[in-house]
Image (spheres, rainbow, N blue to C red):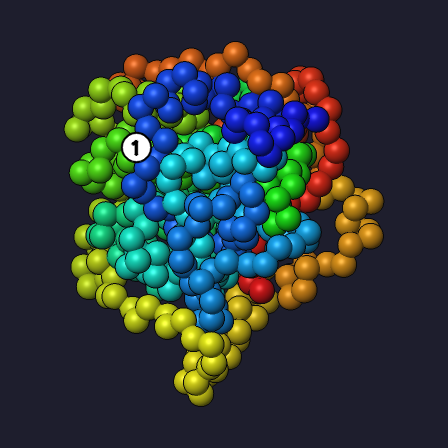
Amino acid sequence: MGTVTPADAAPGPRTDQWWFSAWQIQQRVWPITKGAGVTVGVVDNGVNGQIPDLQGTIVPGANVETHQGDGQIPPTSDLEASHGTAMAGLIVGQGTGTGYMGVAPEAKVMSINSNLAVWDKAIRYATDHGAKVISISQAFNSPNGCRPELQQAIGYALQHDVVVVAGAGNSAEKGNPAMEPANCAGALAVGAVDNKKIPWSGTERQPYVAVAAPGFLVPALDGNGKVNERLAGTSQATALTSAVAALIRSKNPQMPAREVVQRIINTTKDVGPPGIDNMTGRGVVIPGDALTANVPKSAPNPVFDAYDKWAAANPQGAGGQPAATPTVKHSKSASTKADDQADQNTKILLGVVAGVVVIGGIVIAFMVMRNRKKPKAFPAGGGYSPQQGNVPGPPPGWGGHSGQPQGPPQGPPQGPPQGPPQGPPQGSGRPYPPPPGQGGR
């Protein structure tokens, strides 16, 4: 179990936040920047910004589903309802309650309470209200590709110089379906690895995966300010990569979003099958190198290449026409109620057609779930599975990368996932499910 820092002690990180050591955050990253001046839009199911570890880090957002409130939620012990809080903690945790620290603690989080039917509105809201990075740790089984309205919203964000990061998905062992918004052109899709840089067995194997980050046995905050320990998924990897993007934007405020993504991609460390693969893309993110390496302007940028190709084929929608941003109200007009009903109908239809997979990095133990009621209005299934292994101790570091482009793709990995990472690190812990967010509520 990770060490808990008393509230009056110096901020963490906790000993179970092993990515701080792996990424050499305190040695290589924080002497350069802690993310000041950058707002990350967290498109999720709301954030409780009043817990001690998040106080002072949350700027006003919105609930684009109900058109009420500022995107924050009240305290909760419900693990599903805590998902957005968990993602915010990975980015901007202050270490003032449990000792839990975010990778970019001087950045801010804008909570955009959303669901799959209004992701496009959430992205546009975050873009129009000052977010420079948008983090989406949710996923929808999308065999027919990215929906046009969502693709246009991502295009709108990119045209307004915003980095969009999305989780690759958690269902590699459950059919490995393509996931939206990770499969949308221009989204930086992130897979999950453990502290030995071994790909997590559940991380999706898809050609859209660009990079990977810590996601296996990554503890996170819940909505009551406590820490849940035994979590795994591409949600955490997404939030951590979003924090790295915020660090780069803080150090280089004039650097275009295109170059920020290019730096992240071209300073990775190759893992998994040699060369580019469908589990980890070009490799694991190395924040210190992303901040300091010499990345040539000609370095590969498959994320923006995909967007440029889509934009060229869709000139009318490339920038995405600005949609009216939701008005935050305390009472609903008739038109708003009609919009809400339309959104609800959309959610029901999408849930029936394909089901929702929320990549909340959730580990569900059978005995826990048997005694908990199911999240209401969530379709059966999802990207959740019991996790085995022990909470890892801090590794000595992952090493860096020269910053030079990697070689050509070596082809996708063959065959089905091979099960959980071998040789889990030593430690202790207990199973918990983190919250799945509001995909499809």
Q: Which amino acid, by three-letter code, is at mark 1?
A: Ile
Q: How many marks?
A: 1
Tell me which residue sits at (79%, 46%) in the image: 368
Q: Is residue 120 among the parts visible in the rendering?
A: no
- Farthest residue toward the front? 8
Q: Position of residue 384 (x, y in %)?
A: 65, 45
For residue 354, which quarter of the picture?
bottom right
Residue at the image point whose x is 82% and y is 52% from the top: 371
**Quadrant in the rendering for residue 275:** top left
Query: Can the viewer see residue 60?
Result: yes
Judged left or right of residue 137, residue 287 is left
- Which element type, helix, strand or loop, lies under badge 1? helix
- 163 to 201, vertically: above or below: below
Q: Which residue is mark 1?
A: 248
Q: Nearer the viewer, residue 8 or 398?
A: 8
Q: Nearer the viewer, residue 42 or 193?
A: 42
**Horizontal relation, residue 9 to residue 375: left or right:** left
Looking at the picture, how far across and down is residue 349, in whole percent? 54, 70
Viewport quadrant of the N terminus: top right
> Residue 60, how many percent across, how many down?
40, 58
Q: Position of residue 301 (x, y in %)?
A: 26, 34
Compared across the picture, whether 337 is left or right of 351 comes to left
Q: Residue at the location (37% across, 72% down)? A: 327
Q: Mark 1 packing: few (<14 Cα in 10 Å), some, or many (20+)?
A: many
208 or 247: nearer the viewer: 247
